[in-house]
Image (cartoon, coloured by chain):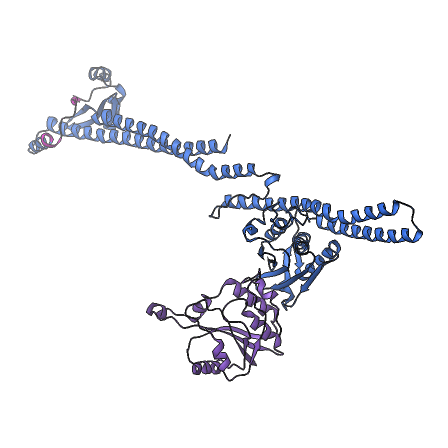
Amino acid sequence: MKTILIPTDFTIESLNTLKEAIKLQSEKVNVVLVYFAGTPDSITEMLFFSKENYLSSFQSERFQEACQILLNTYASKVNSFRIELFSGFWQRVFTSFLEINEVDEVFIPKNYSMKLKNPRSFDPLPYFRKCALPKRSIPWDSNVNVPEKDRVAELFLQISHA
Amino acid sequence: MKIKTKIILLISIISLLFVVLYSGFIYYASANYSFEDFYKRLEIRAVTTAKIQLENGQDLNAIKEVKQEYLEILPEEKIYILPVPSEDSLQAEAIRLNIPISALIEIKEQKAASFRQQNIFYSGIRYTAGATDYIVIVSAENYYYTHHIAYLRNLLVSLLVFAVVLVIIISFWFSKKLIQPLQDITTKMEDISSENLQMRLPLSRNDDELSTLSNTFNGMLDRLEAAFESQKNFVSNASHELNTPLTSIIGEADVILSKSRTAQEYREAMVVILDAAEKLSKKTKALLFLAQTGYNGKVVKFDKVRIDQLIWDVKGTVDKIYPGNKVILDYSLLPENPENLQMLGNEQLLHLALSNVIMNACKYSNDDIVQVSLGASVSQIIIVVKDRGIGIPDTEIKYIYDPYFRASNTNAFEGYGIGLPLSRNVVKMHRGELLVTSVLNEGVTVEIRLPINN
């Protein structure tokens, strides 16, 4: 079964990549979202570090809800869904990350730039562009001035050209 | 009687009953104990005196010493020693010693007796020394009884008075505290009338019976408000939606009747009138359908509702009232599992709520494109209605749920500000949420979330 990797910044707009990527699949896939952020470096934070808690601390309820809507819509196409953390700063580490997660294809937004709200997070797109795996870019019109910005409704209303 | 008085009385009576019982028991037990104790002391004195007076032996001195050393003289202590009188002289002896004759007989027969005359306590024994029997009687004033018991009695009575005051104060405070939330609810309820049905009772944080009561009242108000508003909504819709076709019928008829026309002209006019009348009939039917709020029976019935089906029905209604609308249904994010689109609700009310939202979108965008999307997360069904209309000014968006409020840029549109509050109420009745976001002159996005039935 194919595994696809999609970068996310935990905004609802970024889920467009996911939406279009699943739409393009013809058979069941494993979906991995990846968030690029360094791990904490203070001793107490490292002591009690948990990847799940760390990742969910960045996710809003709306984001999780939007994910659920997509998974409900494409229930028969998605075999598994998980969110991973990538915190290595080198391209080499990213390559082995792809190997470990057995990724077959990556999807990236074409003209959307990631919103790096968390000071530890960094832009995943350069790493994705450099990787050797097959990649597809998903274009859509990014419009900041819409009433439904950052609402779950945004997921419904984004029009894509893919 | 008021509940407050009832509580005060009940608490006071119960607590006072306890206090009286306790003090009575203490008083009785102490008095009893002081009697017993004193009789024993008198008896010891009687025995020692009899030994000293009536017997002679070596250990007498020791007893005498003990008596002097340890047995203090009681107040008014008197000792009588007499040989056991015969049956005949009993009466005379009793009078001489100023004691009841029954006591003498008891001592003679039972060998010991104790009795009292007011504060003087008597204890007598029958003592055999050698061949003769004697009666030894010791009497003394019971100082403990006369003084200590009186003190105890005063103490208990004053305590009782104190307790009465305290109990009344406490029960008063207690009943006030118990009744206070009820009174608050009553005052708040008095403020709510048909004019301000949007008011609600405040909910306390703790989950007690009173907040359940407030909740129930609020639920009732929700339903009442929705019922009231749906009627007003009908009137408001009818007044301007029915007016347009009526005006065109009247105008057409007026023009055609102003002078004589050819048969062809009459026919054309009749076609126009028929068309308008048909529209009118459709609109009236649709509006009447919306006016049935599901309250026809006395209770709101909640059944399983399929939301995707409901949206199709709503579109049908909207098509009748706004024939030129451009509503696009977008089911691209429809969940694969149809159970995720089912919820418990009243179809009529939801129909009304949704059609209001969609008709508003059509109205304020002058029949521009309105996109209606549907999707479902794990626990909620989400309906998104987006228009490209005039939008709502940022400063006014917080007032849009107030009944009769109309934004400052809506002067060109007829309306009474009833539709949206009504829709929101219906959604709230279904434990859902209605969120409105807007950018002025860009459009409005309404997000309706309803809980999935599972």
Tell which of B29 and A71 is nearer to you.
A71
Q: Is residue A119 left or right of residue A76?
A: left
| Residue shown at the point (70%, 48%) measured from the top left | B237
Residue A29 visible: yes
Seen in the picture, residue B184 relative to A124 is either above or below; the reply is above
Q: Nearer the viewer, residue B151 or B178?
A: B178
Residue at screen point 70% across, 46% down: B234
Q: Report the span colored magenta.
A: B67-83
- Residue at the far front in the pictured view: B259
How many marks the image carries: the answer is 0
x then y, percent, for residue B70: 12, 32
Q: Quadrant of the C terminus of chain A?
A: bottom right
Report which quarter residue B71 is drawn in: top left
Q: Nearer the viewer, residue A139 or B432?
A: A139
Q: Is residue A44 above or below residue B407?
A: below
Q: Is B136 covered by the magenta stretch? A: no
Q: What residue is rendered at 9% in x and 32% in y?
A: B69
Residue B416 is situated, as x and y percent measured from the top left of the image, at: 65, 46
Q: Is residue B223 above or below residue B316?
A: above
Could you say which quadrant of the image residue B447 lies in? bottom right
Percent across and percent down for residue B444 are 61, 57
- Residue B60's quadrant in the figure? top left
Q: Residue furthest bottom?
A: A132
Q: Is B77 colored magenta in this rendering?
A: yes
Q: Colour of chain B?
A: blue
Left or right, B105 with respect to B177, comes to left
Q: Quadrant of the image for the N terminus of chain A?
A: bottom right
Q: Which chain is purple?
A: A
Relative depth, front residue between B326 and A4: B326
Residue B108 in view here: no
